[in-house]
Image (cartoon, grey):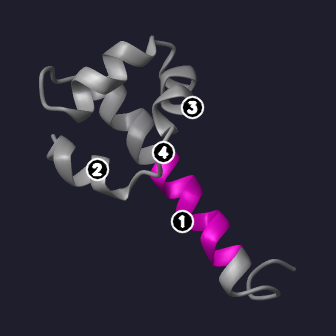
């Protein structure tokens, strides 16, 4: 499992709501996971998917036209 604090540092404020929706859980579960109070492969996967999507969006903004054909 990936260390949850490292993941938390990569997330913008308010991401918990989106991650909860992706994972099909409540926001409190996401908060507990990101604060290291619980471990969950389901939540870890949802967080990693969310971070990957954020990275793709940043790449599109920072490198318009590259790989977007």
Residue 56 lies in the magenta stretch: yes
Q: Earlier in the sequence, mark 3 or mark 4?
A: 3
Disc sitting over residue 18 in the figure: 3
Residue 18, compared with residue 37, is above or below; it is below
Q: Which residue is mark 2?
A: 7
Q: Residue at x 47, y 52 (%)?
A: 12
Q: Is residue 60 left or right of residue 39?
A: right
- Which region of the structure is painted magenta? 50-60
Give the overall secondary structure of the magenta segment.
helix
User: Which corner quadrant holds the C terminus?
Assistant: bottom right
Marks 3, 1: nearer the viewer: 3
Looking at this view, name the residue that lies furthest to the front: 13
Q: Is residue 56 left or right of residue 16?
A: right
Q: Residue 25: x and y, percent?
A: 45, 12
Q: Is residue 36 visible?
A: yes
Is the residue under label 2 in contact with that under label 3 (CB below 8 Å)?
Answer: no
Q: Residues within 10 Å of mark 4 (few under 14, many from 20)?
A: some
Q: Which residue is mark 4?
A: 49
Residue 54 or 35: which is nearer the viewer? 35
Q: Which residue is mark 1?
A: 55
Q: Residue at x 35, y 24 (%)?
A: 30
User: Which corner quadrant holds the N terminus?
Assistant: top left
Q: Earlier in the sequence, mark 4 or mark 2?
A: 2
Marks 4, 2: nearer the viewer: 2
Is the residue under label 1 in contact with that under label 3 (CB below 8 Å)?
Answer: no
For marks 4 and 2, give the CA distance.
11 Å
Q: Earlier in the sequence, mark 4 or mark 1?
A: 4
Q: Residues within 10 Å of mark 1 (few under 14, many from 20)?
A: few
Marks 3, 4: nearer the viewer: 3
For marks 1 and 2, give the CA distance.
13 Å
For marks 3 and 1, give the CA distance.
15 Å
């Amino acid at each position: 499992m990936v260390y949850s604090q490292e993941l938390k540092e990569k997330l913008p404020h308010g991401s918990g709501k989106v991650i909860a929706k992706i994972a099909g859980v409540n926001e409190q579960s996401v908060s507990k996971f990101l604060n290291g109070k619980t471990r969950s492969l389901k939540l870890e996967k949802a967080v990693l998917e969310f971070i990957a999507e954020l990275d793709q969006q940043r790449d599109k903004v920072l490198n318009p036209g590259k790989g977007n054909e």
